[in-house]
Image (tube, helix red, strand yellow):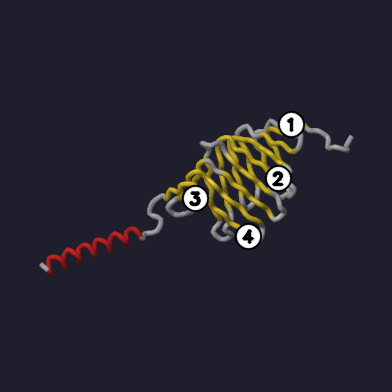
Amino acid sequence: MKRFILSIFFLLFLSCQQKSAIDSLPYSEEEKVERFSLFRSDKSGEWRILGKTAAISPDRKKTSITDPKLTINTEKRKVLTLQTAKDGVAEFTIDEKTNRINSLTATKKVIIIQRDEKGQIVFKSTSERAVYDGKERVVILTGNPIVEQGKNKFRGEIIRYFVDDGKIVITGKVKGTVFPEEGEE
């Protein structure tokens, strides 16, 4: 009887060892996360990504989020917020060296708002797709993009917004309405 119990124990021990070895293999399948939140901070500012759900690739290099919201606080105390419709999606990658967003692509009724240090809106856009390039720190808007700066409103096929200096470059079928700034004539 002792031998029987010992052999069952030994078999259970081996099967547990085998299972834990398989479970410990890194990144074997896509990981799903509910109420996703990721925060990073360094000398150039901080950023936060929130989402309803996230699917993280097995190699941990790409993450896809539903109902995403991205907030970037720059060293110049500007705050950039990107959000999609509830059924919108964003995919992003993080630069392994700098630990910052390398790229982010958001789709479905993307709204971007940038506020200055006083909380005033300095830039607002809507589009069907926005691609953020973290190295160049530029947002490329496509899919009927519209940009507003104060009372001024612009449309084009492609709109590039350079986050750090507030520069806008519009290409393809450009339309716009420009109002003189107060005090100008």
SS of the residue at dot 1? strand
- How far, Cα to Cα, is label 2 from label 3? 28 Å
Quarter of the figure with the N terminus: bottom left
Bin the neighbour count of mark 4 within 10 Å (Cα to Cα): few under 14, some 14-19, many 20 and up: few
Any mark on residue 141, and which?
none
- Identity of the amino acid at label 2? Arg
Residue occupied by mark 1 = 176
The kind of secondary structure element at disc 2 is strand
Residue 62: mark in rendering: 3
Disc 4 marks which amino acid? Asp
Marks 1 and 4 in Cβ contact (< 8 Å): no
Judged left or right of residue 42, residue 7 is left
Which is closer to the viewer, label 1 or label 4? 4
Q: Nearer the viewer, residue 161 or 11?
A: 11
Residue 115: numbered disc: 2
Q: Position of residue 142 (x, y in %)?
A: 61, 36
Marks 1/2: CA distance?
22 Å
Sequence-wise, the earlier of marks 1 and 4 is 4
**Label 3 is placed on what type of residue?**
Lys
1 vs 2, front mark: 2
Lower sequence index among marks 2 and 3: 3
Foreground tag (3 vs 4): 4
Q: Secondary structure at mark 4?
A: strand
First reached walking from the N terminus: tag 3 or tag 4: 4
Q: Are marks 1 and 2 in contact (CB under 8 Å)?
A: no
